[in-house]
């Protein structure tokens, strides 16, 4: 069919008249399309008509007016202040933020684990290779929802009470109320440290630009990575000391029944995050492995024969070429993870679907809620796809 | 001659081979293997030690939990609540029939077994490449088997009626994923054809449908089919809950199938299309006889991949209130008769093992097919 699709741009050739009207592919095409469009429109109209009638019968008002009404339900974990007195619209916003939070954290963890395991599958170390293989084969064949349940009901729920929480060191502790972490508290002056670090980052970036340009011109190398890191650390540390150390950590302290202070990641969030990251990492590992394998071994040998060491060979020769193969499937894995955050509803983590579900049950505004779900997920997918495509284009092979 | 004899008497000439020296100790045998594969460089040695530490940290507790401290017999929770007891396999043993059949009536469970047997009867010859009658086999798997199983499971023809809310366990998982597969393959092919059609209206409708469904999670599709479908239909028309879930799963699977099939169609060289047209084939014969056989063969691994994903995704029907394998395990470990700290983990590990066996078998089969097809394309 692509052949036909390209033909309109080609010069129009005068065709001989067909024997019958029905045998002319062009005219037949118009008829088929017209029929299809009429059917689709009629189908949608029929659905809309039925829905309107059913809603009227059930006395459910349509429209988005319900978004301003009082929500009334509580949300366990929220990044922005929330109470049951807020509106449905605000509750949905909390849900969207929670979804995005889980998606971003999950993508970061899954990428780190996935890359490590993927490289491990190609390691020259037999033991590491076997371990990585077991990881991948084990976790990609188990439904993520089951893994979520496993962490939530099988592991976290049977952990000790916060009173006897398992101490992980550095103020982190794990109990059946989730993961307690120290909470950074910024005092007056922390802003200046932030600014100093930002300045350091800009300076490091400029330094690396200058170093690259100089290497292009003269061939002399400059350790721009370490120098840049030093600039950032020195600027940060100096301003930290100068403003009088404006940061301390609020470490959770055991009281009689609970842990006080610090910040708390609820068991729902922890199990959701762990399960999604572990599951997606097994797919990312396979993608990374395929990407590295796709770079022919001749590239490595050529790099070695030019005198590059193992590190620079990996960084400058293998990885940039592997990335081109890796990015498109990686994008779809990220999208899958983002969509899988909706499994949160099964353990009551207040993501977009869970909040929407509560609203749907309370108000019966199913059409509107489903529409909001679709729009938000499609929007998030679109944003992520645009970002990843931009990165893909940046990394793509520049051919002459 | 004697001259030569005299010479060889004078000089030493070796007449037999020297006995072979053993190779250096560090190049053969287990020690060499360990050195080469585990301790070739300092970095590798560190990795090996980390690996061993991981194994020591993870494996013994799991073995302790699953075997040594496990509770194998018992009739209720009292067996499993002892301090320090491991996996509560007694729970799995007691509820095993439920995990397989759900709440399907005891007396009628043979019908489910017959369904499983009929399924195997079709699947086994289908998956052996050299088995004959492939066309009949496809017909059996896609038409005869679904129709027969429908009557077998729901009732009719003298069999008592079994309501779908009683269905559950592994049987429901198989039913949902099988319906998804049987529906999604033809629907996916049609959608893929539509998306590659030359007619803009057809292309637009198919593309919009595929992209919208692909952009949202399965749960929202399931919610939509369970909450919105009753609203969409005229008053009085009412669908079974299971049927609503099946519609959602089938729609969802078919758009992924469509994208996979489209990939295969794009991989068929343009010359095949042109050749088909040159011999005077019109659209449908061209697709049926030339393009689709090649395209589908190319994407068999992708199709099996979708089956695997679908099999895992069926676990989500629990969220809209159906009790598939995961759902029934989930409800059973909340049962006060069996509630103990170890029951959830035990039940879930059992379910995970079942899912794993199915998915791993499918993925191995897909790798086998891929290798088999590759040999044909190697030059």
Image (cartoon, coloured by chain):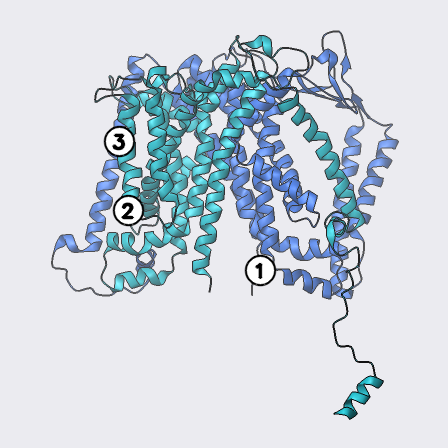
Chain colours: A blue, B cyan
Mark sitting earlier along the chain (2/3): 2
Instruction: Give the image location of residue B107, x and y in percent.
Output: 33, 16
Q: Is residue B330 placed above or below B251 in the rendered structure? A: above
Residue A27 appears left or right of A79:
left
The chain letter under disc 1 is: A
- Quarter of the image that includes the N terminus of chain B: bottom right
Query: The residue tagged with tag 3: helix, strand or loop?
Result: helix
Which residue is disc 2 drawn over?
Answer: B135
Cα separation, mark 1 vs mark 3, equals 55 Å
Q: Residue at x 40, y 29 (%)?
A: B174
Residue B147 is tagged as 3
Disc 2 crowd, CA 10 A, few/some/many (<14, 14-19, 20+): few
Q: Is residue B299 visible?
A: yes
Instruction: Give the image location of residue A345, x and y in percent.
Output: 51, 21
Q: Is residue A96 visible?
A: no
Q: Residue furthest left?
A: A19
Which residue is disc 1 drawn over?
Answer: A398
Q: Nearer the viewer, residue A177 or B25?
A: B25
The chain letter under disc 2 is: B
């Amino acid at each position: 069919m692509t052949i036909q699709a390209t033909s309109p741009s080609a010069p129009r050739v005068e065709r001989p008249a067909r024997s019958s009207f029905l045998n002319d592919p062009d005219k037949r095409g118009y008829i088929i399309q017209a029929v299809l469009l009429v059917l689709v429109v009629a189908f949608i109209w029929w659905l809309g008509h039925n829905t309107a009638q059913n809603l009227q019968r059930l006395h459910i008002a349509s429209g988005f007016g319900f978004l301003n009404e009082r929500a009334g339900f509580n949300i366990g974990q929220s990044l922005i202040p929330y109470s049951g007195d807020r509106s449905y619209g605000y509750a949905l916003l909390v849900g969207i933020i929670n979804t995005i939070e889980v998606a971003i954290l999950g993508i970061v963890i899954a990428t780190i684990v996935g890359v490590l395991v993927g490289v491990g599958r190609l390691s020259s170390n037999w033991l590491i290779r076997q371990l990585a293989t077991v990881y991948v084969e084990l976790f990609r064949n188990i439904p993520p929802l089951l893994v979520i349940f496993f962490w939530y009901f099988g592991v976290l729920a049977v952990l000790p009470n916060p009173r006897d929480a398992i101490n992980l060191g550095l103020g982190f502790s794990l109990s059946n109320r989730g993961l307690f972490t120290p909470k950074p508290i910024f005092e007056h002056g922390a802003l200046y440290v932030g600014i100093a670090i930002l300045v350091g980052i800009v300076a490091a970036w400029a330094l690396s630009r200058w170093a690259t340009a100089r290497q292009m011109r003269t061939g002399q190398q400059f350790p721009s990575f370490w120098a840049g890191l030093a600039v950032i650390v020195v600027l940060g540390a100096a301003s930290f000391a100068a403003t009088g150390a404006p940061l301390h950590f609020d470490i959770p302290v055991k009281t009689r029944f609970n842990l006080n202070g610090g910040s708390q990641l609820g068991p729902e969030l922890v199990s959701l995050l762990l399960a999604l990251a572990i599951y997606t990492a097994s797919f990312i590992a396979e993608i990374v492995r395929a990407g590295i394998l796709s770079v022919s071994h001749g590239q490595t040998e050529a790099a070695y024969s030019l005198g590059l060491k193992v590190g620079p060979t990996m960084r400058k020769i293998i990885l940039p070429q592997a990335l081109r193969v890796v990015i498109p499937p990686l994008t779809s894995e990220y999208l899958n993870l983002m969509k899988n955050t909706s499994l949160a509803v099964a353990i009551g983590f207040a993501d977009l679907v869970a909040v929407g579900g509560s609203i749907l049950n309370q108000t019966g505004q199913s059409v509107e809620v489903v529409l909001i779900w679709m729009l938000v997920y499609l929007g998030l997918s679109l944003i992520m796809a645009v970002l990843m495509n931009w990165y893909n284009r940046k990394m793509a092979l520049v051919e002459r | 001659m004697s001259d030569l004899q005299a010479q060889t008497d004078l000089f030493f000439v070796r007449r037999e081979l020297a006995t072979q020296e053993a190779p250096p100790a560090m190049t053969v045998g287990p020690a060499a293997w360990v050195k080469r594969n585990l301790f070739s460089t300092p970095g590798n040695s560190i990795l090996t030690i980390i690996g061993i530490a991981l194994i020591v940290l993870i494996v013994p507790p799991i073995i302790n939990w699953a075997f040594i401290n496990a509770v194998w017999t018992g009739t209720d929770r009292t067996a499993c609540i002892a301090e320090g007891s491991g996996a509560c396999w007694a729970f799995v043993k007691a509820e095993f029939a439920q995990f397989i059949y759900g709440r399907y009536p005891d007396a009628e469970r043979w019908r489910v077994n017959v369904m499983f047997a009929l399924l195997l009867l079709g699947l086994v010859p289908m998956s052996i490449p050299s088995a004959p009658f492939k066309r009949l086999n496809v017909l059996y798997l896609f038409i005869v088997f679904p129709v027969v199983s429908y009557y077998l499971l729901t009732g009719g023809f003298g069999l008592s009626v079994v309501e779908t809310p009683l269905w559950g366990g592994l049987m429901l998982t198989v039913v949902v994923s099988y319906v998804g597969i049987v529906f999604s393959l033809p629907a996916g092919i049609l959608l893929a054809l539509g998306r590659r059609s030359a007619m803009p209206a057809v292309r637009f409708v198919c593309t919009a449908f595929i992209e919208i469904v692909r952009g949202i999670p399965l749960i929202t599709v399931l919610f939509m089919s369970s909450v919105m479908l009753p609203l969409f239909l005229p008053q009085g028309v009412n669908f079974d809950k299971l049927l609503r879930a099946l519609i959602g799963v089938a729609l969802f699977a078919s758009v992924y199938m469509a994208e996979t099939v489209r990939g295969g169609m794009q991989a068929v060289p343009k010359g095949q299309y042109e050749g088909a047209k040159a011999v005077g084939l019109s659209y449908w014969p061209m697709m049926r006889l030339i393009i689709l056989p090649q395209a589908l063969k190319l994407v068999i691994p992708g199709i099996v991949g979708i089956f695997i994903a679908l099999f895992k995704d069926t676990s989500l029907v629990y969220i809209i209130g159906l009790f598939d394998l995961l759902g029934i395990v989930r409800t059973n470990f909340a049962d006060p008769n069996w509630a103990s700290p170890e029951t959830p983990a035990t039940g879930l590990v059992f379910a995970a093992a079942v899912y794993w066996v199915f998915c791993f078998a499918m993925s191995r089969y897909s790798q086998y097919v891929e290798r088999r097809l590759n040999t044909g394309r190697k030059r």
